[in-house]
Image (cartoon, grey):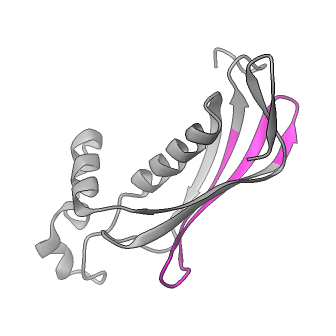
């Protein structure tokens, strides 16, 4: 990520933040189901999922976004989300490499507008598209 430090906070600029390949396992799906309470069989039951149109378990959409958010926080620890949009146009499956990427699109006052994307490494299919509005801790949005 491009940026400078001022008064201990990262000042971001437009452009790429990160692009990393992550492979989520069935164990990751199962752990997320336990924590979130979303134990829909499409996520956690391989036998059930085999009989669906997907043929195998499908990641929770929010698990994908949680990975994106974790990657953002690794690169911008002070980031605080104040808004988001999410779309999941295609399924993501266990044990397939996914490319998680994020970029700063625009900066307005104390907020950055980010675009995120998760794609399958094998075929480039987009499995998650998201936007977020983010502020640094200590900015004008403190306490919200």
Q: Which residue is depicted at the point 60% across and 44% down?
A: 72
- Report x, y in % for residue 74: 56, 39
Horizontal relation, residue 144 to residue 43: left or right: right
- Report x, y in % for residue 103: 72, 54
Residue 132, placed above or below residue 50:
above
Q: Which residue is depicted at the point 73% across and 47% down?
A: 1
Viewer-proximal residue, 53 or 26? 26
Residue 30, placed above or below residue 139:
below
Q: Is residue 122 magenta?
A: yes
Q: Which residue is depicted at the point 45% across and 56% down?
A: 64
Q: Is residue 100 magenta?
A: no
Magenta stretch, residue numbers: 106-133
Residue 93, placed above or below residue 28:
below
User: Which of the 4 image quadrants contains residue 87?
Assistant: bottom right
Prevailing SS of the magenta stretch: strand
- Report x, y in % for residue 111: 79, 34
């Amino acid at each position: 990520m491009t940026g400078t430090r001022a008064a201990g906070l990262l000042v971001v600029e437009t452009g790429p933040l990160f692009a990393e390949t992550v492979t989520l396992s069935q164990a990751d799906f199962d752990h997320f189901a336990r924590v979130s309470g979303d134990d829909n069989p499409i996520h956690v039951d391989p036998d059930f999922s085999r009989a669906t149109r997907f043929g195998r378990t499908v990641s929770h959409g929010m698990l994908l976004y949680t990975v994106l958010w974790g990657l953002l926080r690794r690169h911008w620890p002070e980031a605080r989300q104040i808004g988001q949009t999410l779309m999941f146009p295609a399924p993501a499956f266990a044990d397939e490499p996914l490319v998680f990427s994020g970029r700063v699109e625009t900066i307005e006052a104390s907020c950055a507008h980010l675009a995120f994307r998760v794609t399958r490494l094998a075929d480039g299919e987009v499995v998650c598209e998201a936007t977020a509005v983010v502020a640094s801790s200590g900015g004008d949005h403190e306490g919200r």
